[in-house]
Image: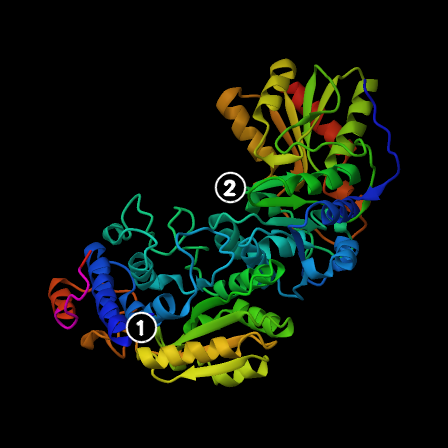
Amino acid sequence: MKTYENTGSKDTRSGFGAGLTELGKTNENVVALCADLIGSLKMDDFKANHPERFFQAGIAEANMIGMAAGLTIGGKIPFTGTFANFSTGRVYDQIRQSVAYSGKNVKICASHAGLTLGEDGATHQILEDIGLMKMLPGMTVINTCDYNQTKAATIAIADHEGPVYLRFGRPKVPNFTPENQTFEIGKALHLTEGSDVTIVATGHLVWEALEAAKTLHEKDISAEVIDIHTIKPLDAKAILESVAKTRCIVTAEEHNHLGGLGESVARVLSQHNPTPQEFVATNDTFGESGTPEQLMDKYGLNAAAIVKAVNKVLKRK
Amino acid sequence: MATTTQLEALTTQVRRDILRMVHKVNSGHPGGSLGCAEFFVTLYQDIMDRKDGFDMDGIGEDLFFLSNGHISPVFYSVLARSGYFPIEELNTFRLLNSRLQGHPTTHEGLPGIRMASGSLGQGLSVAIGAAQSKKLNNCGHTVFALTGDGELQEGQNWEAIMYAAANNVDNLIATVDLNGQQIDGSTDVVLDLGNVKAKFEAFGWIVLEIEKGNDIESIKAGLTEAKAKSGNGKPVAILLKTVMGNGVDFMMHTHAWHGKAPNDEQLAEGLKQNPETLGDY
């Protein structure tokens, strides 16, 4: 089985910051907006190097999204930065009307998504944002898995014409995808080849899926791990090809099972190849305070939970 | 440069367009549209520096953003009569497959529209973004915006008002249609706006008032003064005191025609009060 090495844990938000720094040098149309979270979003470098292209909105996310929409008129490519909760739920109507329906080329970049922001608790831990964003017509939804991929995705979305929701997180997590990779929106990545079960994971759960695959391998269960960084548009072909071989699937995400990756996968399967599926996701609940590890354990979002789901789905084949 | 007489003639024709558009589909918002007819006509025909044709980026020309999108009839009529699309297309207002949606949108590719509006309170933020984009592009032109007065109850406006002053967005002229009416009644009764002028000034804006907001000479003078005062480090607000339903006597001074279409007899009466000047669509 192909294995992956953690080259040194880093936070995905720093990948975003590094990508934005790169864009600052290479694309003069890129502008950035932030709602009083420059340090948390790692936007300091862009701000320092390009003060004229940086807009501090203050704690006023609705105005920030509106301004981003307006900045596109004249050819700018705005990247907004705040926590995932304030990037989506708080400004849903602004995104819906001023960005998505208006067809504006705005990149909504959201850190601290999911449970892993930890101790701040449920007010800041959004588990509904993928659902909110994927329902908007024309919105591309990306949830990256590590530092390198987040940096590559940040750079790639600048060249994509149209609104994008880019979701990443707060904690340091294993960095295992290639440095300076080319990021292709909508293209699933096969991380391991397998024949018994397909594990489709997104975001922080991709590394957990790889860990689960190792455990399963020791028990002679061959898992095919797919990193599905783009939830919309979904790489249906990759999923269907894999389940044609494995005939069962587990989806894994740091998100509510309602409205997340799992439901998008289920729709593809029910239309083309009904397949037993188990969901590793939160079960229609809010989060709570705790360390990221404690929370991922309590809410069943880690390698152990994926192994459990695989054992369950194998029996349903 | 159009004369006031020409602008008045166009305004009368725009009123006819508004009445006929909403009557045909028995829906739409004639009250606020009629109240702003003189403003739109003056802005597009006399004040704005516009390029021929339409491109979304609008570099090298003045831009306009309508935040209170429900007054789409007046916007569509003035855009059509300013050459953005054929006036015959006004006939498709609110119909299936039309580019003239109930509320304005970029989604159907209608020339002249740069953002969707309808859900209130968002236009000023977009206008500020567009004004910042103009500065980055070293484009010395002005961004105009129009919001309703009831719409100021939406908190996003005050985020935008605070931002524009704090960041010296001085290539922006935002007009508030101060007609004192909203769906549920007068703004004083629904949710009192208080002293709008003092509020804008407290946020750091230059504020001008146009007392006769349905008088073309007054609007011209006010907008010209606003342009003269822009570019000096502060955003400029115009409080435009209009009469809802202006030009059709039974629609004036009431919120009753905010979102209601005239019936056949009412249309005939409204058209009688506004005889055809430049030709109906």
Q: Quadrant of residue B81?
A: bottom left
User: Is residue A224 in sight in this rendering?
Assistant: yes
Instruction: Please report the residue visible at 58 percent of the width from the left and 30 percent of the height from the top.
Output: A265
Instruction: Please report the residue visible at 63 percent of the width from the left and 54 percent of the height from the top.
Output: A87
- Residue A187 in the image, given as x and y percentages of width and height: 64, 28
Q: Which residues are magenta?
A: B272-279
* Number of numbered discs visible in the structure rendering: 2
Q: Which mark is residue B38?
A: 1
Main SS, magenta region, reads: loop
- Per the image, the residue denoted by label 2 is A138
> Regarding mark 2 in the picture, which secondary structure is present there?
loop
The residue sitting at the right extreme is A8
Q: Amino acid at mark 1?
A: Glu
Q: What kind of colouring is applied to the model shown? A: rainbow
> Are marks 1 and 2 in one subunit?
no
User: Is residue B191 in sight in this rendering?
Assistant: no
Q: Rounded to the nearest whole Å, what is the CA distance between mark 1 and mark 2?
A: 37 Å
**Relative to residue B119, is residue B233 depicted above or below?**
below
Q: Amino acid at mark 2?
A: Gly
**Relative to residue B270, is residue A128 depicted above or below?**
above
Q: Quadrant of residue B6?
A: bottom left
Magenta includes A289?
no
Instruction: Please report the residue visible at 34 percent of the width from the left and 59 percent of the height from the top.
Output: B79
Left or right: where does residue B64 sit relative to residue A192? left
Left or right: where does residue A152 sit relative to residue B256? right
Q: Residues within 10 Å of mark 1 (few under 14, many from 20)?
A: many
- Residue A209 in the image, given as x and y percentages of width and height: 75, 30
